[in-house]
Image (tube, rainbow, N blue to C red):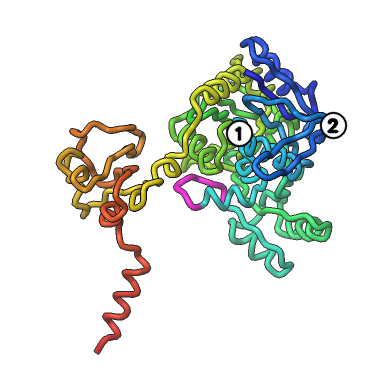
Amino acid sequence: MRIAILSRAPRCYSTTRLRAAAKERGHDVQVLDTLAFSLLLEEGHPSMYYRGRRLRSFDAVVPRIGSSITHFGTSVVRQFQQMGVFVANTANAIGNARDKLRSLQMLSRYDIGIAPTSFARGRSDILPAIERVGGAPVIIKLLEGTQGVGVILAETRTVAEAIIETMQGAKQNVLIQKFVAESKGKDIRAIVVGDQVVAGMRRIAQGQEFRANIHRGGKAEPVQLDPRFERAAVRSAQILGLRVAGVDMLETSSGPQVIEVNSSPGLKGIESATGMDIAGIIVDYIAEQVMFPELDVRERLTVTKGYGVAEVTVSTDSPLAGKAIADSGLREEDIVVLKLENPGHVVPNPDPSVVLCPGDKLLCFGKLAGIKSLLPVKNARRRRSTKRATAAP
């Protein structure tokens, strides 16, 4: 297998470890400078040049895109995607993770603990924004900072306001995040590869430093993650579209709070703390994906008119509740259950004898008319109907 590692720092620990792990497994691997590419866009033939020469074909790409070159770097990754090359993380996923506001917006829609965060541009909105996350002290973050750079602890409301005004005056967008005192100086980093957490560590700040990043002098220790932390990490990576990610979480009395998701997690701290070959795990995952590429089920299964894929949640008043799949009438409606999911369990291609319970989520393929009858009426539509009925004489 031919692998390209996109990196502007060929001698940094993570890049050298990925390269060594790939070579140990017999792969042909090259480290390529992300800024040395040029892109050629032609009808039906997207291609690239590297240092002036047409690029040879690769089977897989591992992007290590720095924050200073996000736009061009993701353009290069996207071009590889258009050429049919497997990328460990897609351009869209990298963009999702790199923009801290966007990533938290995406996570906030789901049942995932996140640190309360506010974003405001107007000067008059700064103090209200601070109060909305619980008041000072607060954490102030640049939208695209990395490795702890651009993260400031403001102890008082006055200091926070001054910092935010200064940053906004310098044309920098910032987030205002609740400071979780019980987690001061420490956090959890989980490494997600594919659909599982492969390693975890607790990072602990040293001295008076509140940032636990390894690059800021933080120390790391291995940790066996609670299942709640594993679920939060995997789900966060999936929501952002990342196949390889480092998910940072705070330990709070109410459970994990996700504070950041990284698309190019450093490997030195996690490998040193755990003694695990994380680079090798990533390379093995990539090789498996190249051999057995993921398919977009919705795209592949919706080619027949009138058929499609949809997720159906079994409610207490659903006609499916309490019935086995075989007795539910789904097959008679030309509907197949591809996956069943409930808290803590995912069952692909569930057995027909499985009894459906309220709260179960079913990924179904079949006639859209039949699937539609299983979907609940939207609350907004119910409210409008109720309002009209109340207003009628």
Q: Is 159 on the left-hand or right-hand side of 111?
A: right
Q: Secondary structure at mark 1?
A: loop
Q: Secondary structure at mark 2?
A: loop
Q: Is 357 on the left-hand or right-hand side of 273?
A: left
- Give the position of the C terminus as an image quadrant: bottom left
Relative to 99, is 81 above or below?
above
The amino acid type of the residue labelled 1 equals Gly
- The percent position of residue 65, horizontal first and vertical second, equals 72, 35
The residue to which callout 1 is attached is 84
- Give the position of the N terminus as an image quadrant: top right
Q: Earlier in the sequence, mark 2 or mark 1?
A: 2
- The percent position of residue 6, horizontal first and vertical second, equals 73, 29
The amino acid type of the residue labelled 2 equals Gly
The residue to which callout 2 is attached is 52
Is residue 312 in the magenta section? Answer: no
* Label number found at residue 187: none
Q: Name the residue at 66% across, 20% down.
A: 2
Relative to 123, is 351 above or below?
above
